[in-house]
Amino acid sequence: MASIHPFDPVTPGEIKLASQIIQKALPGVPVRFKRIDLQEPIKKDVIPFLESERLGLRPLPTPPPRIIQALFDNEQSGALNKALVNTRSKSIVYIRELPKHIQAPMDPEELVEMEQLCLNHPKVRAEIEKLELPAEMSVCCEPWMYGTDDIHETRRLIQCYLFVLEVNDPQCNIFSLPCKFSPVFDARSKQLVRIDYLPSGADDKVTPTTPWKPVKTVQYAPNLIDEPLREDLKPYIVQQPLGGSYTVEGNAVSWQKWRFRVGFNSREGLVIYNVTYNGRNVFYRLSLSEMTVPYGDIDPRRPYHRKQAFDAGDVGFGITANQLTLGCDCLGHIKYFDAYRADGKGDPIKMSNVVCLHEQDNGLLHKHTNWRNDVATVVRNRQLVVQMICTLANYEYIFAWTFDQAAGIELEIRATGILSTTPFDNENGEIAPWATNVGPGVSAPYHQHMFSYRIDPAIDGFQNTIFYQESVPLPNGPSNVYGAGYTTVGNTIKNSGSEDLSVERHRVFKIRNDSIKNPITHKAVAYKLHATPSQMLLNGPESFNQKRAVFATKPIWVTKYQDDELFAGGEFTNQSRRSDGVDIWAAREDNVENEDIVLWHTIGLTHNPRIEDFPIMPMERISVALKPDGFFTKNPALDVPPSDQRFNKSTLHADHSVADSRACCTPKDRVVKL
Ligand SMILES: [Cu+2]
């Protein structure tokens, strides 16, 4: 335990210790643990330790004690509790009973329990029997977060969407055959609350359950599709005979001039901590802070008006992170990281290979050919990728942070998996203005994926300022005689709040450190956010969907750093009634000039499905980059060795002779003279 770092993910020993201390503090109380995770260290307490590490000062100061956070149900009273446990003093910091309307996130054991409870309930079974399914077919249950449409609701409700399973195969596509009824359960009392009947036409009419009309499942798995697999692909083998160019010690990663730590928790999954470049501070913490997926529809087609997932807060990217496999999810020379979560008893569960780290070649980083002599300087773009893949019910999300050799960091999000579908009677050519028909009797409703990227900067220090710069035409006059001039205008963000992007004005947000000037540009050192302009939340201000996810109404938020302000939609999103997150913190109008600040970028994907997104979706990609902008005095990648065929060992296609080829950087025999 002595060498554990303040940012290391919770260890199995800490999970066990925390659960034992909590159980001991509550003798005789039946406890069911929902989460046990590292409590984020208090920033001001951890910075002296980080700075000593960065500057190579020894001995290192004592790091702050590791505090473990637990969420648990008191199964006697039904109350949700939050506790903090100090692992150094082995004592409780506090145990707090939370208000009755606060719901903990869902956990894997609960999902399995609800699935079984639903499918075994006599009333649900009676409804399934009305389908008169053939013997080889069955019904599968997808327990969903209930969402919100009633401010007085305090029950923990689960909406169970049911699907017909055509064949008993682990890869059978359940989402092709949605049922028209959906039981709602109280997850605490385990009682069936009611069965919702789902509208299956263009209006909100529902119908009683009738025998199932045979239609074929649209399958995606190779063993279930009725077409042969392609046979014209040759192997593509990524070989790194000397291994990767990175080194990993525990969770500390060194690659090229980058140093950072890989963090992991149940909620956010992968977190990037303490990022430095060539010994200079760049970012304190980078994370995918929240994500919400509200489904569009036409009111009042219940229950879709409250179909809204908060994938981080209601379930968790960490809890749902895939255990990645070599040669499938990741190619090349791979380093995997494991993590641990707690089960209901407070015992650690190992999650192997939930984060992968590897290098990739991404084309060219820079090149210039002197056309007079055809001599080229060519440098390839080697990158380091840190990645996790999360399965949230039907969808998969691939989150990858990519570090490059020119001091840039890109967050790439890829959405794949299967569309969340609804029953829709389309056999007579019916279409709906809020969904796409993707198969017989099935449609995929319009929806949005709204992500909040939390950027906690440390540009050459922890006091930074955010400003934006716009490119604007100069007014006609003595300084713009020909009307061709344009310039940039800047605006410093002085108080916390929200901002819009502007493509028309090329508005670029930057993070600068006013105390350090670039000796060439004579401006403060800075990084810029290469933002992704996207449509913000479509749900109206009167909707619970928007009230719960105000973060998704603005692309940019700036707040003054405060401990415990990590999640854009608030700490507890499951059945939340309103946001308790970044919009509330931003509204303080704190001074954010030369302060410890946080930049939040909302990225949206308005997803009106294509039929080609079904039965499994070719990945949809969005990305956001952070790039130095006046942080260096020139391109920081000039020292990357040039590209060289002796190093890269590429081969020629059969119709070329060796004589046709030239090694990199050798001039042609002929020199063109103009
Ligand atoms: Cu989608």
Image (tube, helix red, strand yellow):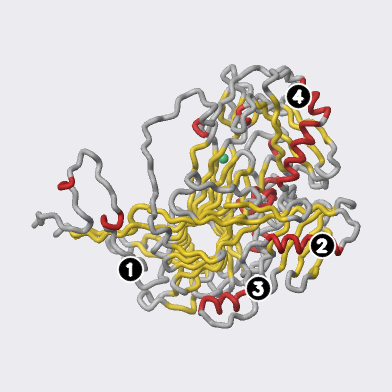
Is residue 445 toward the left or the right of residue 643 in the image? right
Screen quadrant of the N terminus: bottom right
Mark 2 Cβ and ligand 1 under 8 Å apart: no
Mark 3 and mark 2 residues within 8 Å of each other at the beta carbon: no
Residue tagged 4: 128
Query: Of discs 1 and 3, which sits in the foreground?
Result: 3
Q: Earlier in the sequence, mark 3 or mark 4?
A: 3
Specify the amino acid type for callout 4. Answer: Ile
The image quadrant of residue 214 is top right
The 10 Å Cα crowd at callout 1, few under 14, some 14 to 19, many 20 or more, is few
Residue 52 at x, y = what percent?
56, 79
Furthest-front residue in this view: 241
Query: Can you tell which of label 2 and label 4 is closer to the viewer?
Result: 2
Q: Looking at the image, tell me whether mark 1 or mark 2 is earlier in sequence order.
A: 2
* Label 1 sits on residue: 639
Mark pair 2, 4: CA separation: 43 Å
Asked if ligand 1 lies within 8 A of label 4, the reply is no
Q: CA distance from mark 1 to mark 2?
A: 54 Å
| Residue that numbered label 3 is attached to | 2
Residues at marks 2 and 4 touching, judged by CB atoms closer than 8 Å: no
The type of residue carrying mark 3 is Ala
The mark that comes first in sequence, 3 or 2, is 3
Rendering coords of residue 375 (x, y %): 19, 59
First in residue order: circle 2 vs circle 4: 2
Badge 4 density bin: few <14, some 14–19, many ≥20, Cα 10 Å: many
Image: 617 above or below 451: above
Residue type at mark 2 is Ile
Secondary element at image label 3: loop
- The answer to whether residue 456 of the structure is visible from this angle is no
Residue 213's place in the image compared with 497, above or below, is above
* Residue 614 at least partly seen: yes
Residue at x-position 73% and y-position 25%: 206
